[in-house]
Amino acid sequence: MKTKDFSQQSALVTGGATGIGRAFTEVLLAGEIGAVIIASRRQNVLDEAARELNLKFGAGRVVPYAFDIRSRAETENLVRFALEKCGAIDVLINNSGLAVPETVTEISDAGWDTVLETNLRGAMWLAQMLLPRMLEQDFGDIINVSSQAGKNGYADVPSYCASKFGLLGFAESVRDDVRKRGANVRVFNFCPGLVDVETPPDEAPRAGFVHVRNMAKTLIYALSLDRNVILEDINIYSR
Ligand SMILES: NC(=O)c1ccc[n+]([C@@H]2O[C@H](COP(=O)([O-])OP(=O)(O)OC[C@H]3O[C@@H](n4cnc5c(N)ncnc54)[C@H](OP(=O)(O)O)[C@@H]3O)[C@@H](O)[C@H]2O)c1
């Protein structure tokens, strides 16, 4: 199966300027990936993250792009920009996500749509738009950030659970699709419990949380596996 040197690869990380996405971006850069496009809504947050990371890892390796994943037009523009900038996106990380805490009797149409469109439809769009290019070059990785709320239901966030369960079902279908084609495209899903994205790198996490550095390590581990290896949903949580 085709391999591609990591330094020749490019990644697109949605929500790549903050939290888990930022840790993913940093570890990809530390691993000498060629370039990372970080994309989310707030231009100032993206610009500041790109400035800091380019200072640390080398000019021009992080490219910020502002878009709203709930807009098909903006998502199409992001994909066009990313392909023009990098030639190919080898690693797609569907990480943007949010929760609207409404119990089942409280769920509003606006809350439901916000969560489902951000966490599920947006990830579907990006996979749909980038998979054809991965098939063309017969190389690619799609990483989806689901949650333990994609494995278990929680009364306070039913719409979030529905979106994260849905993301796993969609991802499994993509995996089945690429398997049937015999394509060299892998699909990994993270299902984290509570992740501490605030505690500094060298300190112990808050009780009950996994430090975000473990998400970053696991990403690199998953990407380092042989191309024919399927690593199913990565359940990662604090004991
Ligand atoms: N932290 C945890 O404990 C935990 C546990 C399990 C799963 N997760 C999942 O991990 C992922 C990252 O979460 P995080 O904890 O790192 O929180 P975070 O820092 O709030 O990350 C969420 C990212 O999504 C982006 N985003 C939100 N709405 C968007 C939109 N409409 N269009 C484009 N981007 C959008 C946000 O940027 P903008 O606001 O600038 O758009 C932000 O960068 C999420 O999918 C979350 O559900 C987190």
Image (spheres, helix red, strand yellow):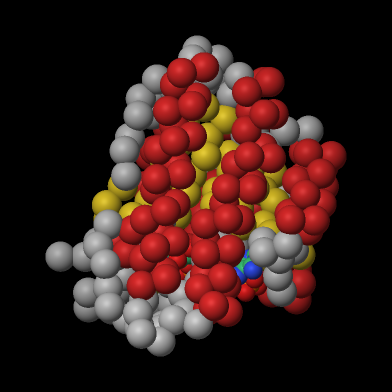
* Residue 198 versus residue 187 in the image, above or below: below
Q: Taking 164 as reference, is 109 above or below it?
A: below
Res. 176 visible in picture: yes
Q: Residue at x 59, y 24 (%)?
A: 139
- In the picture as drawn, the residue positioned furthest to the bottom comes out as 106
Q: Residue at x 52, y 39 (%)?
A: 142
- Residue extending furthest toward the left: 239
Q: Position of residue 156 (x, y in %)?
A: 32, 81
Total number of numbered discs in the rendering: 0
Residue 220 seen in the figure: no
Q: Position of residue 230 (x, y in %)?
A: 35, 29
Q: Nearer the viewer, residue 224 or 203?
A: 224
Is 149 rendered above or below residue 81? below
Residue 225 spot, x, y in % from top left: 38, 29
Relative to 60, 198 lies left or right: left
Q: Residue at x 40, y 59 (%)?
A: 164
Q: Residue at x 61, y 56 (%)?
A: 122
- Which part of the image, by quadrant, shows the C terminus? bottom left
Quadrant in which residue 65 is drawn? bottom right
